Image (cartoon, rainbow, N blue to C red):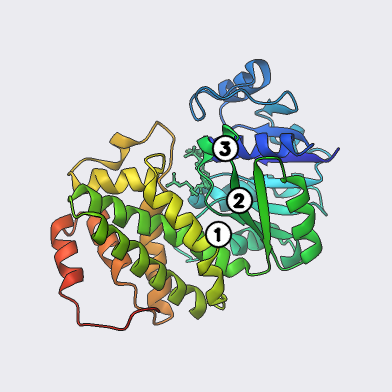
């Protein structure tokens, strides 16, 4: 039995811990708040993030990072994107030297424009072959309820990718492998921005044709950015690209989708999230746009989302501005 440590006990960290346990791993789940760690350890639940879900006995909760990381064969990072670097600095000396470091966060770092795998490498000094990204259409509550889901495990080193995929393959969770870490991470980060745009379109009552246009043009600008950063275009047609967009943009479970709806209705994003929950697109959107501008990539949807989130432009005006753009070519 492999020993896995999940650092971060929000919705996805906890659901992924359940998947690892179902796949036969012995799992330590680190929670920042001692009361969450205690609830996981004593009652096998994390009701704040995954109501109605019972965790397997093989998932053990702790608020002590040293205890969580001792002897780990696999380390899963499940903290929000903007908090990843500072947490890794804190944990650096506790990380087992050879264990793969698996990032679950979907975002771009504000200030540096770094993708999460770069943050992991920079903050830990880990070799790129040890850094793994897991991303796909994986709404945490569905995964925790063991509703079937597929994902992408991306790593520059196929052996590390296979080891991580083995550790998280269960009857209801099916990983696909990739070596396109940049593509998988760009797809995951930008889909949150596109989901905000879809939520905004829905909140404005624009209809399904408009939402389909936002999803498709959103995917086109995601792929443009990814390719400029060295990703393969095909990655964006896969689970981490089109797959995750379909799930996130269609589901009321998506926090980014709900946040977009709130913005269109003039509500605050915080009004539609649970305390401590994150809608990563809100913080990452300006970082995505900054990255795109540095690489000369046009991202008109992201540009409008950034302005709406910042309160510089109202949602209806943003939709009109997109329709008033000069005609362009379909894909990509
Ligand atoms: N929830 C999903 O369905 C899902 C699926 C795939 C990927 N993800 C990604 O996984 C990452 C983690 O999301 P999640 O859904 O597990 O989180 P969540 O939104 O359910 O909870 C937020 C997490 O951040 C922690 N947190 C909040 N403020 C903090 C602070 N100041 N310092 C330290 N920790 C703090 C909370 O304790 C909690 O663990 C995100 O990047 C998200 O995009 C989420
Ligand atoms: O709830 P969201 O919007 O963060 O989306 C969750 C996952 O990323 C879906 O794959």
| Whether label 1 touches label 2, CB < 8 Å | yes
Q: In the rendering, which numbered label is found on residue 247? A: none
Identify the residue at image location x=69%, y=57%: 124
Residue 57 is situated, as x and y percent measured from the top left of the image, at 73, 23
Identify the residue at image location x=63%, y=40%: 16
Residue 159 is situated, as x and y percent measured from the top left of the image, at 81, 62
SS category of the residue bearing label 1: helix
* Residue under label 3: 147
SS category of the residue bearing label 2: strand
Nearer the N terminus, badge 3 or badge 1? 3
SS category of the residue bearing label 3: loop
Residue 315 relative to residue 178: left or right:
left
* Residue under label 1: 239
| Residue at mark 1 to residue at mark 2: CA–CA distance | 7 Å
The answer to whether 39 is drawn above or below residue 194 in the figure is: above
Residue 139 relative to residue 288: left or right:
right
Task: Report the front residue among 258 and 128.
Answer: 258
* Residue under label 2: 150
Residue at the top extreme of this rendering: 42
């Amino acid at each position: 039995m492999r020993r896995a440590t999940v650092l971060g006990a929000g919705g996805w960290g906890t659901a992924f811990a359940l998947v690892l346990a179902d796949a036969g791993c012995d799992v330590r789940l680190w929670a920042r708040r001692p009361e969450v760690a205690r609830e996981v350890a004593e009652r096998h639940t994390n009701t704040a993030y995954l109501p109605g879900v019972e965790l397997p006995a093989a998932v053990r909760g702790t608020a002590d990072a040293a205890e969580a990381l001792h002897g780990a064969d696999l380390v899963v990072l499940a903290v929000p994107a903007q908090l990843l670097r500072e947490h890794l600095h804190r944990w650096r000396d506790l990380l087992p030297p050879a264990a793969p470091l698996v990032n679950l966060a979907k975002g771009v770092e504000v200030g540096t424009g770094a993708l999460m795998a770069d943050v992991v490498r920079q903050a830990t000094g880990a070799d790129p072959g040890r850094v793994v990204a897991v991303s796909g259409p994986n709404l945490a509550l569905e995964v925790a309820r063991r509703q079937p889901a597929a994902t992408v495990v991306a790593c520059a080193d196929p052996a590390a990718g296979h080891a991580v995929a083995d550790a998280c393959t269960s009857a209801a969770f099916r990983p696909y492998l990739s070596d396109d870490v940049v593509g998988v991470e760009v797809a995951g980060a930008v889909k949150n921005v596109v989901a905000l745009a879809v939520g905004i379109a829905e909140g404005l009552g624009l209809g399904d044709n408009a939402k389909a246009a936002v999803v498709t043009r959103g995917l086109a600008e995601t792929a443009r950015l990814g390719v400029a950063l060295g990703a393969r275009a095909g990655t964006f047609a896969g689970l981490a690209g089109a797959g995750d967009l379909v799930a996130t943009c269609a589901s009321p479970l998506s926090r980014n989708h709900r946040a977009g709806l709130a913005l269109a209705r003039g509500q605050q994003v915080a009004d539609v999230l649970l305390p401590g929950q994150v809608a990563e697109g809100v913080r990452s959107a300006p970082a995505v746009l900054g990255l795109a501008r540095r690489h000369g990539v046009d991202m008109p949807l992201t540009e409008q989302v950034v302005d709406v989130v910042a309160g510089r432009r109202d949602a209806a005006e943003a939709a009109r501005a997109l329709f008033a753009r000069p005609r362009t070519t379909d894909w990509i």
